[in-house]
Image: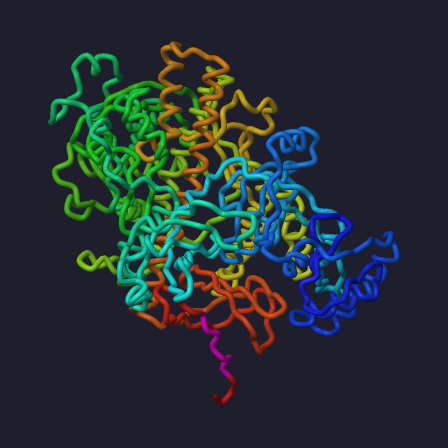
């Protein structure tokens, strides 16, 4: 039985079912037939008993056949699949009265019938179930929802592990009534299917969150209707042009033929297009903004304005393959036993002037987008790989933060300013890690891949060791104040340089050299946040991290309690300590911590850029995970436009020439929202690129065996975390005893369709087997 929007009507989809008008008994009969396919007989009995109690407490409603059922018998009437949208005026009034809620729609990529928008009360997400509830909105859209009448709420069953019993509750149901902004690109990747008796082809998106689309045959390849089988594995890009309320399918036009499904280039182009990533060449107008003539040198008058640090021992520590080097470090021992530590960041704002074509292009892209095999840069390569990149043995313009620190990491003084540096070495994380692990070793230039550095290698080595010691103290201080870091598994691929196919993959290992850089980048970001907020309290671009959803944390706490796991969720530091206490050296303990980390990440919210003048309550400025009052991004301006805005604010604070006004505040907030959206899309692109290459690896090198740990158990299925590769898989219809944290053996095998793989549960070994 399916309840309609009207509070006193019910739509009956079961053929031959009489109208249960005012008849609770008929109502229960319909429900039992509807549920028998999905639930056991005992659960049906419990549900009906619960409904008996429910109907006894509410007035009898008048049930009649809805327009949906009537339209089936009507002549010339099209079935109404979706509800019509509210008017702008009704939406405005509903939002003001608190009857409607606005938010960004998130659709579960694994379970496309589940969608959410954030609750304004921050306790839990608002849940929308089914395609009809989304009412033609797509992932990322800004929508307005309303709460459906109580008789349309969903009956759900909760298991009580400790009591070996079940209970029934009613889950509120919501529906989209208006789309404020179509954030989704409406461009999707997929395949075509031919129907001989139709004037259109059916486009099936790869992303199941997007509806199937009717495409005119005139858009299809010329011989598509003659030889449709030739295009069975061809990827196309389609753009949705319309989606009417009387059609379950959208209407669209083919935009491009990509190539064969399962090949890297067409799959990658499809991912980028779907997620609104501009990977086109920069326009001539943008390139005209780049410095002339070339090769370019720093003007003498600019050098005079800056602190000259070119003689200092300054170096970069980055991934071995990095080309956009936007941060460098320095550390000098002072006569009094303290240290002068510097963080030097590429001065991108010098080259990207406001209100230019280059600035507009960078602000629209908002972030560099990283894939497994390539980077889509935010800036032209002349800037991000040459003029701005802090390459060794070249004079480079920078913004520096220089502290006087005690060996324990206590800040004695702080200086911000524009500078010029000359990096003496490009170290990889592995190089720096080798130095940390062998403090007494004398390294040769060849070992560190250095070509006649200006400063002796011993001097560089000593600076790395000093920075490492200070970073350890800084980290201990942060942890003592109660910080949280939920490390998610990140795959690292070994790519064949000729074929670009993956040879192998492994889980990326986070080492002390990574932590060294992280600590000083955090220190610089925190210092900059306080500085620009102090100078421009209504204009600072900051980054906040809201606390996790209260209700989801309560449910996590209850689940852990039922499993006998003592976990403290009262604060970020308490949660971190609980996770640390669960750590063991054996495979089971490490896997259990990985699963718990994943479960704890579900209630967490995303960190967001915002303008300080928009939020009046400074309690909302806080960064939950770092457990600090103010934070921003300053250290990666080559790849993040938000950092360029922060650099401009910092430069203005030093000269105090910026005009602070309401218009500027709104402009900063608008750009902050755009950066949030682009950062979220870039994150998803990276995830899909990793999935693409992992699917290729399984196809080319599989089957792959690994241990896995159960993360969640449902009625007919369970989810696992594949430990060796950090991927998640779903199993259906299992025939062995399974519970959360069960350790199982799985085999990943390629399916017939490109890039899809199946995780097979291997049979447990028995004695004598």
Residue at image point 41% right, 43% down: 185
Q: Residue furthest bottom?
A: 768
Residue drawn at x 60%, y 65% as measured from the top left: 713
> Residue 120, can we see it?
yes
Magenta extent: 759-765
> At x 29% / y 32%, what residue is drawn?
328
Placement of 410 over or under 625, stated as above or below? above
Q: Give coordinates of residue 84: x percent, y percent.
A: 60, 43
On screen, residue 559 versus residue 297, left or right, reads right
Q: Nearer the viewer, residue 534 or 100?
A: 100
Q: Nearer the viewer, residue 495 or 19?
A: 19
Quarter assignment of residue 225:
bottom left
Which residue is drawn at the image coordinates 76% and 65% (left, top)?
Answer: 163
Q: Is residue 766 above or below residue 145?
A: below
Res. 440 visible in picture: no
- Residue 574 at x, y = what percent? 60, 44
Outermost residue on the front side: it is: 75
Q: Locate the N terminus and report the quarter of the image it occupies.
A: bottom right
Q: Position of residue 252 (x, y in %)?
A: 41, 49
- State the count of labels: 0
**Residue 693, position in %: x, y?**
33, 58
Give the answer, above or below, for where 96 lies relative to 247.
above
């Amino acid at each position: 039985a399916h309840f309609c929007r009207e509070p006193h009507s019910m739509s009956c989809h079961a053929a031959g079912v009489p109208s249960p008008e005012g008849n609770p008994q008929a109502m229960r009969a319909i429900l039992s037939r509807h549920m028998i396919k999905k639930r056991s007989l005992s659960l049906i009995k419990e549900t009906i008993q619960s409904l008996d109690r429910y109907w006894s407490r509410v007035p009898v409603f008048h049930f009649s056949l809805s327009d949906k059922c009537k339209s089936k018998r009507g002549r010339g009437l099209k079935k109404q699949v979706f509800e019509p949208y509210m008017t702008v005026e009704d939406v405005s009034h509903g939002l003001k009265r608190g009857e409607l809620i606005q938010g960004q729609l998130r659709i579960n990529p694994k379970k496309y019938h589940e969608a959410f928008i954030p609750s304004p009360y921050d306790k839990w997400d608002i849940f929308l179930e089914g395609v009809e509830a989304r009412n033609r909105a797509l992932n990322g859209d800004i929508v307005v929802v309303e709460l459906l009448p109580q008789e349309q709420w969903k009956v759900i069953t909760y298991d009580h592990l400790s009591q070996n019993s079940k209970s029934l509750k009613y889950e509120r149901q919501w529906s989209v009534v208006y789309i404020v902004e179509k954030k989704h690109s409406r461009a999707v990747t997929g395949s075509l299917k031919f129907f001989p008796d139709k004037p259109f082809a059916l486009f099936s998106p790869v992303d199941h969150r997007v509806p199937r689309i009717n495409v005119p045959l005139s858009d299809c390849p010329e011989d598509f209707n003659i030889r449709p089988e030739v295009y069975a594995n061809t990827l196309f890009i389609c753009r949705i042009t319309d989606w009417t309320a009387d059609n379950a399918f959208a209407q669209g036009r083919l935009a491009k033929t990509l190539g064969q499904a399962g090949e890297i280039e067409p799959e990658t182009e499809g991912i980028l297009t779907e997620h609104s990533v501009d990977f086109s060449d920069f326009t001539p107008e943008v390139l005209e903004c780049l410095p002339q003539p070339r090769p370019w040198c720093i003007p003498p008058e600019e050098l005079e304005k800056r602190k000259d640090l070119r003689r200092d021992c300054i170096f970069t520590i980055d991934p071995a393959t990095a080309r956009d080097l936007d941060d460098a470090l320095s550390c000098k021992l002072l006569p009094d036993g303290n240290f002068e530590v510097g963080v030097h960041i590429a001065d991108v704002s010098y080259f990207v002037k406001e209100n230019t074509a280059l600035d507009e292009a960078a602000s629209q892209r908002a972030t560099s987008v990283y894939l497994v095999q390539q980077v889509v840069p935010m800036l032209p390569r002349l800037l991000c790989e040459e003029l701005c990149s802090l390459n060794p043995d070249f004079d480079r313009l920078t913004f520096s933060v220089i502290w006087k620190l005690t060996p324990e990491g206590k800040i004695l003084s702080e200086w911000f300013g524009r500078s010029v540096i000359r990096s003496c070495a490009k170290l990889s994380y592995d190089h720096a890690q080798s130095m940390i692990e062998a403090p007494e070793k004398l390294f040769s230039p060849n070992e560190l891949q250095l070509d006649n550095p200006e400063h002796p290698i011993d001097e560089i080595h000593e600076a790395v060791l000093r920075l490492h010691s200070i970073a350890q103290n800084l980290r201990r201080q942060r942890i003592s104040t109660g910080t949280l870091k939920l490390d998610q598994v990140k795959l690292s691929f070994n790519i064949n340089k000729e074929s670009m196919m993956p040879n192998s993959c492994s889980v990326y290992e986070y080492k002390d050299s990574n932590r060294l850089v992280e600590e000083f980048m955090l220190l610089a970001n925190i210092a900059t946040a306080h500085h620009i907020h102090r100078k421009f309290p209504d204009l600072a671009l900051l980054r906040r991290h809201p606390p996790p959803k209260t209700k989801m944390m309560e449910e996590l706490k209850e689940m852990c309690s039922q499993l006998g796991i003592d976990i403290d969720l009262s604060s970020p530091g308490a949660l971190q300590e609980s996770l640390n206490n669960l750590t063991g050296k054996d495979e089971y303990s490490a896997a259990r911590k990985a699963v718990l980390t994943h479960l704890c990440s579900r209630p967490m919210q995303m960190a967001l850029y915002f303008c300080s003048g928009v939020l009046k309550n400074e309690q909302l400025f806080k960064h939950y995970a770092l457990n600090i009052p103010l934070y921003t991004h300053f250290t990666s301006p080559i790849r993040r436009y938000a950092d360029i805005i922060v650099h401009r604010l910092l430069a203005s604070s030093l000269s105090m020439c910026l005009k602070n006004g309401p218009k500027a505040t709104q402009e900063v907030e608008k750009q902050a929202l755009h950066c949030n959206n682009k950062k979220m899309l870039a994150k998803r692109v990276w995830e899909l690129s990793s999935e693409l290459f992992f699917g290729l690896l399984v196809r080319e090198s599989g089957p792959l065996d690994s241990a896995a740990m159960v993360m969640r158990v449902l009625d007919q299925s369970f989810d696992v975390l594949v430990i060796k590769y950090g991927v998640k898989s779903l199993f259906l219809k299992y025939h062995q005893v399974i519970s959360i944290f069960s350790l199982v053996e799985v085999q990943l095998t390629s399916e017939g369709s490109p890039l899809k793989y199946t995780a097979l549960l291997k049979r447990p070994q028995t004695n004598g087997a």
